[in-house]
Image: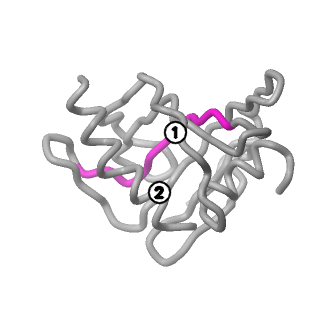
Amino acid sequence: MHSIRNTLCKLVLPTLLAVTSGGVAAAWVEVGGNELTTTYADAETIRRTGSLVRMSHLVDHTKARGIDGIKPYLSIKMENEYDCDQERTRTLTISLHSGNMGDGELLGTVTVPGDWRQVPPDTLVETLRAFACGKW
């Protein structure tokens, strides 16, 4: 399982940092996108404990992507934790789905929290943190 987590983190997380961007469920709010992806935040999942905030988001791809050993996926759901005071984040869970908007077959999950990392300025990660922390 650790190798799947490493593979997901090495291949999926850089994609999320590098790109910003059917029917959308009522909770999803579009926060970024381009011709390849659209990213949505789920306002209904925001949970605050002091300066820490948890929130789910979804990255929806226009074309299927692949990872060795896993069927092609069209969407990624993630739950992240944001430190609104320290401007840092960490990924808590990742799930890959064969269909758009988190539909279809669940292809893989990682539920081991990642390490804290600083939020780079002018990125999708910064937009998600601002949304979660109520500064969007």
Give the extent of the magenta segment: 72-82
Image coords of residue 17 (percent x, y)? 49, 59
Is residue 80 within the magenta segment? yes
What residue would you read off at disc 2? 16
Query: 73 or 19, which lies in front?
Result: 19
Is 79 above or below relative to 30? above
Query: 103 or 48, which lies in front?
Result: 48
Query: 63 or 93, which lies in front?
Result: 93
Image coords of residue 109 (percent x, y)? 36, 30
Q: Is residue 120 left or right of residue 71?
A: right
Residue 78: image tag? 1
Query: Residue drawn at (76%, 52%), measured in percent from left and top?
Result: 130
In terms of secondary structure, where does tag 1 sit? strand
Query: 25 or 96, which lies in front?
Result: 96
Q: Are marks 2 and 1 in contact (CB under 8 Å)?
A: yes
Residue 116 occupies which quadrant of the picture?
Answer: top right
CA neighbours of label 1 inside 10 A, class few (<14), some (14 to 19), many (20+): some
Figure quadrant of the C terminus: bottom right
Residue 106: image tag? none
The disc labelled 1 sits on which kind of residue?
Met
| Spatial CA span between label 2 and label 1 | 10 Å
Image coords of residue 27 (percent x, y)? 73, 43
Query: Residue drawn at (59%, 47%), measured in percent from left and top?
Result: 118
In terms of secondary structure, where does tag 2 sit? helix
